[in-house]
Image (cartoon, helix red, strand yellow):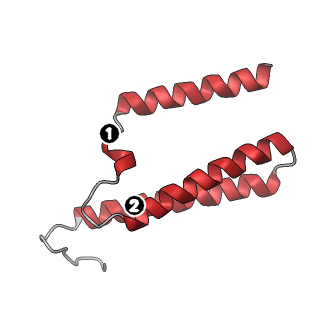
Amino acid sequence: MYWGDRGEKGDRVSADTAALRLAAAVAEIEGLHAALTHSTDPARRRRLLLELARAGTRLADLAATPAGRIPAQARHNSRRQRRRAALLRGAHWLTERLS
């Protein structure tokens, strides 16, 4: 979709949102790949590979989602749930570092 083009219903917002979601998923994969190439710790490499696999699955789900539909992963993703997930990731990271 080119700049200024309109979708079926005349709104460009849904197509722009879908493109942003895809770009974010690709950027996540690129970041994980970069971290994986610089990692030497076997445990960290395993974690990165698992995260990379999950990110690839999310990208495939996003790519298969028709434009204008919200993917299942983002449908019930409230701010509170995102903050709780970030808190749990931080707690998990701290317990790994300190144990």
> Could you tell me residue 83's position as x and y percent?
45, 29
Amino acid at circle 2: Leu
- Which structural element holds mark 2? helix
**Of the residues tagged 1 and 2, which is closer to the observer?**
1
Crowding at dot 2, Cα within 10 Å, few <14 / some 14-19 / many 20+, comes out as few
Q: Quadrant of residue 29?
A: bottom right
Left or right, 49 with respect to 23, comes to right
Q: Is residue 73 above or below residue 11?
A: above
Where is the C terminus found, in terms of image quarters?
Answer: top right
Identify residue for label 1: 76
- At x 12%, y 70%, the residue is 9
Residue 57 or residue 48, whichever sits in front: 57
Left or right, 66 with respect to 43, comes to left
> Could you tell me residue 12's position as x and y percent?
22, 68
Crowding at dot 1, Cα within 10 Å, few <14 / some 14-19 / many 20+, comes out as few
- At x 75%, y 26%, the residue is 96
